[in-house]
Structure formats: C-alpha cells, structure tokens
Image (cartoon, rainbow, N blue to C red):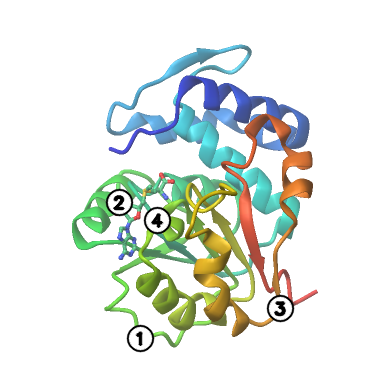
Amino acid sequence: MLEHTTQDEGAKNLTILREESAHLLERIESLRANDSIGNPFTFEYPDVGRISPSTLRYMKVASDLHRLFGGDLGGKVAEIGVGYGGQMFVNDRVFAILEYHLFDLPPVLQLASKFLESFILSGSYLLSTFIQHTGDEIYDLVVSNYAFSEFPETLQRAYVAKILAKARRGYLTMNTGRKENEKQTFPRRIAQPAAAVRDIRRAPADSRNELHPRLGSQNRPCAELGRDQRA
Ligand SMILES: C[S@@+](CC[C@H](N)C(=O)[O-])C[C@H]1O[C@@H](n2cnc3c(N)ncnc32)[C@H](O)[C@@H]1O
C-alpha cells in the first residue's frame, strides 16, 4: 500500500476536520475501517484514537468536497490516480455515489479492486486505464489527489481533453507546480487545455492559503472545474 502521509499531516488534517466537519468525525468508526486492510501505519490522535494519517487525509478531502459542492456530489464520479482506493472507500461512506470510475495503471487497479472488494460498498465501481476509456462519459465530479499534477504534460492534456473538460465539477490536489521559481508550474502546464474547459475557476493562491494556512500550499484543491453547473 502507498503510505506517504506523515503523522504530523494527519494531525493538521484532524484539526481542520474538527473545525469544518464535525459530522465526518462523528462517523469515524465507520471510516476507520479503511485501515483494516493492508496493515497501514497508524498513530494515536487525541480523542479519535488510533488511525492512519492517510485515512485522515481522505476524510479531509471528503470534507473539502462537502464544503465546496454540498452533500450531493451527483451519481457519477471519477478519480484519476487512485492508489489503493482509500479515497473511494471514504467517499462511498460519506456520499451517495452510484458509479465511481477509477483510473490508474493496470496493477494499481488490481490492488484497488482487491482492497475495495474487502468491503460492502453502497455504490458500484468501474476500473479503467486512460486508454481503455472511450471518453464518452460526463462525470458529475472528477477527483485527483496528487496524481494528475505528477503526470507529464502530454498525459495531462490527454486527460483534460478526454475526461476533465467534459466533467461538471473537478477537485484536484497537487504536489508539483506551486513554487514561484519552478520553471514548469502547474497552471502553465495546463493553461492551453484549460482554456478549452468550460468555466474553469482557479482560486487565487492567497485565498487558498488563507483558508488553510496550516497546510500551506500543499494538500489544497488547486482548481475547481465548472463548479456545480447544476446549481
Ligand atoms: C501520488 S499517487 C496518489 C495516489 C492517491 N491518489 C492518493 O492520494 O493516495 C499517484 C497515482 O497516480 C497513478 N498513475 C500513474 N500513472 C497514471 C496514469 N497514466 N493514469 C492514471 N493514474 C496514474 C499512480 O499509479 C498512483 O496511484
């Protein structure tokens, strides 16, 4: 399993969850089941007990989705770069999602399937590589935690054209392209395809940091695509 969230990041996400999403913390027992497969690193946190920082990170993303888009994300959600499937697990327990389409590489999709099949999920899921996807889906929401931002530009453009440009809403977190002195920054990398995306909205960096100064520029949604066009 992928473990790249630190104990300290877990504590920061927990603080945000306390401030913004008490309703999610009330469901922590159900969400803690995310740690029951694969023997992840877990740590003791005040009041919530032992839990993996990755689960707290996925809960923080669910909290962001709830804050940005409300409790109804729509019936069809896609995630690009899913790791072991933890975000889908948490989203399935928090939102009513009918179909969750997971995009990743074949062996990673196998791992995600093995993980997800360990639970009774409310919604259904479909596994796909980028190539296998026909591009004929209009998703209510597309999520990508770090993955999209790590792709080479050609793949980013291809994902925008085939999936993101058609999505009603999007939520992307990134771990590249935010430093002022970086030559290839994320916004520049997607500038051209993003121009083709209807109603792309980027929150200015300052307002993002103002929202969650503890996390700095990392772990923040970097773009909201066509935010809730149904409203
Ligand atoms: C940094 S990990 C993030 C995993 C997960 N989103 C998380 O937050 O734990 C990046 C993910 O992108 C996936 N990935 C790499 N190439 C990909 C591609 N062509 N299409 C979709 N996902 C890809 C990797 O296999 C991995 O699961």
Is ligand 1 within 8 Å of the beta carbon of the residue shown at mark 3? no
Residue 22 position, x and y percent, is 73, 32
Residue 26 appears anywhere in the view: no
Give the quarter of the image for residue 59.
top right
Amino acid type assigned to the residue bearing label 3 in the image = Asp
Mark found first going from the N terminus, 2 or 4? 2
Which residue is identified by label 1? 134
Disc 4 crowd rating (10 Å Cα; few below 14, some 14-19, many 20+) is some
Give the mark toward the camera: 1 or 3.
Answer: 3
Q: Secondary structure at mark 2?
A: helix
Task: Find residue 150 and name its label.
Answer: 4
CA gap, disc 2 and disc 1: 21 Å
Residue 172 appears anywhere in the view: yes
Most foreground residue, 15 or 73: 15
Which residue is identified by label 2? 112
Most foreground residue, 181 or 206: 181
